[in-house]
Image (cartoon, rainbow, N blue to C red):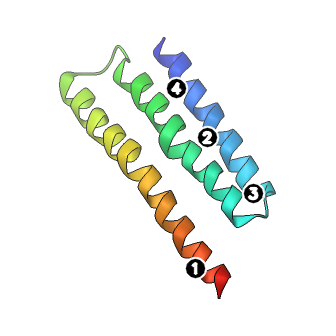
Amino acid sequence: MSVTLIWAGAVVSAFAAIRLLLTRDRFLRLHFVSLGSVLAAPLVVAGLALGTWSSWHDVAKLVVIGALLFVTGPATVITVGHAAKRASDG
């Protein structure tokens, strides 16, 4: 189960990175950046936390890291989007 979650997060992250490189529209690129923090990172963190080698210390650290990425990722994307909009307006 944990390996599946890790690989699913890696696939989503790779897809987002490839689409990010191939897309020229700066606002559409923000959507692919958010895939990494909102979907890929929690999948990888959950997979690592469910690993049989994980102690409760490791799981606690991973949960904090995952929560920070999940909460701050969208806010960062929104802030960058607003800045890009202001820069394009002139």
Residue at the limit of the structure toward the bottom, as seen here? 90
> Residue tagged by mark 1?
86
The type of residue carrying mark 3 is Leu
Q: From mark 2 to mark 3, how far is it between C-alphas? A: 12 Å
Mark 4 or 2, nearer chain start: 4
User: Residue visible at 52% across and 21% down?
Assistant: 5
Which SS class for mark 3?
Answer: helix
Front residue of this view, candidates 14 and 58? 14
User: Residue visible at 46% across and 51% down?
Assistant: 74
Left or right side of 40 for 26: right
Task: Estimate how packed mark 1 is, as few (under 14), some (14 to 19) or many (20 or more) residues with alpha carbons within 10 Å.
Answer: few
Task: Estimate how packed mark 3 is, as few (under 14), some (14 to 19) or many (20 or more) residues with alpha carbons within 10 Å.
Answer: few
Q: Name the disc covering residue 68, or none.
A: none
Pointer 4 and pointer 1: residues touching (CB < 8 Å)? Answer: no
Residue 86: give x, y in percent of width and height: 58, 79
Q: Name the disc covering residue 13, or none.
A: 2
> Residue tagged by mark 4?
6
Residue 87: give x, y in percent of width and height: 61, 82
Left or right side of 77 for 51: left
The type of residue carrying mark 4 is Ile
Which SS class for mark 4?
Answer: helix
The type of residue carrying mark 2 is Ser
Q: From mark 4 to mark 1, how far is it between C-alphas? A: 37 Å
User: Residue visible at 75% across and 57% down?
Assistant: 21
| Residue 4 quadrant | top right
> Residue tagged by mark 3?
21
Q: Quadrant of the C terminus?
A: bottom right
Residue 71: give x, y in percent of width and height: 36, 46
52 in relation to 62, above or below: above
65 in relation to 2, above or below: below
Which SS class for mark 1?
Answer: helix
